[in-house]
Amino acid sequence: MVCNHFLSRIKRRYNVKKAGFSGTLDPFAQGVLIVAFGQFPKLFRFLKKAPKTYRATLWIGASSPTLDIEKVDNVEVMLPFHPDSVNFVLQSMIGEKTYLPPKYSAKKVDGARAYDLARADKEFELKAITSTIYDCHLVHYRPPFLTFEITISEGGYVRSIGALIAERFGFRGCLSALERLNEGSFIYENEKALNPLEYLDLPQNAYLKDPQDILLGRKLSVENFEKQEEGIYQIVIDEVLSVVEISANGVEYLLNSLSLKA
């Protein structure tokens, strides 16, 4: 996988042994990739990393089982579409869309990756998913290539959305280029180091009793917190981060005592 190859390079560059990434990129794609070192990959599920915005170029009339240019097997020639039609189709994509993920994707089927099954010519079915598309607009149109920007909920597949757009024009289509412009609050700034606390999608809370209760992972009571409403909260004590969930069943640690010190 391209992301794993990139991660190996990053680990060598910064001389670290443990690292992880969130949100894979397709082999032909480029753009934002969140990388964390040491214990910080544990924070991935708590980060502000949705929705995501992509710039994609759709090759209308090109057929490919991968829904990108890796395996183009047929190209239809067509007349250009009117700009008003192009804008109408793109605007019609906004909202909730239910569709099939690409067969060449990292989706798991009975424990196996879909792309491995597809490359082995195995028969399998993927379950439909639903994504929310918040924006979809034209960047430029040079027939047969249509470049658009799309903002989509986490877990969405722009290759499949591109195929849906082509279908609305009455043709097949695949992506010839894809760039992730942002992943939630994350943008590319030349491998800039980030303060994870600024990117947590969690409200802060305060523990009113002995801080050692949290630092040592002791059992906690709801009444000892400043905010007692049900929810997931970040607690920072002496540059040590914990994440707790308050519910009708009490208080549960989701993450305990991750040091924020460099």
Image (cartoon, rainbow, N blue to C red):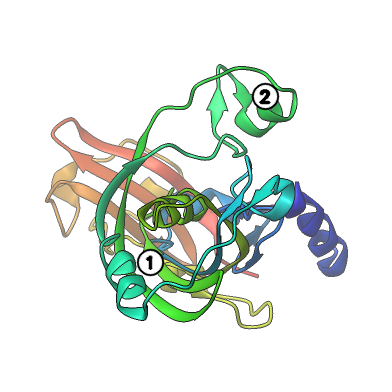
Kindly identify the residue that appears in the image at 53 percent across and 40 percent down: 102
- Figure quadrant of residue 118: top right
Viewed as shown, does residue 129 lie left or right of 115? left
Q: Is residue 170 above or below residue 117?
A: below
Helix, strand or loop status at disc 2: helix
Viewed as shown, does residue 107 lie left or right of 52? right
Identify the amino acid type marked 1: Thr
Label whose residue precedes the other's in the sequence (1 or 2): 2
Position of residue 57 measured from the top left corner of the image (x, y, whole percent): 56, 68
How busy is the neighbourhood of tag 1: few (under 14 within 10 Å), some, or many (20 plus)?
Answer: many
Q: Quadrant of the C terminus?
A: bottom right
Are dots 1 and 2 in contact, CB under 8 Å? Answer: no
Kindly identify the residue that appears in the image at 54 percent across and 34 percent down: 107
Kindly identify the residue that appears in the image at 62 percent across and 40 percent down: 65
Viewed as shown, does residue 11 lie left or right of 82? right
Q: Is residue 39 visible?
A: no
Kindly identify the residue that appears in the image at 16 percent across and 59 percent down: 226
- Figure quadrant of residue 77: bottom right
Position of residue 68 measured from the top left corner of the image (x, y, whole percent): 63, 52
Identify the amino acid type marked 2: Leu
The residue pinned by badge 1 equals 151
Q: Is residue 178 above or below residue 143?
A: above
Q: Which mark is residue 211?
A: none
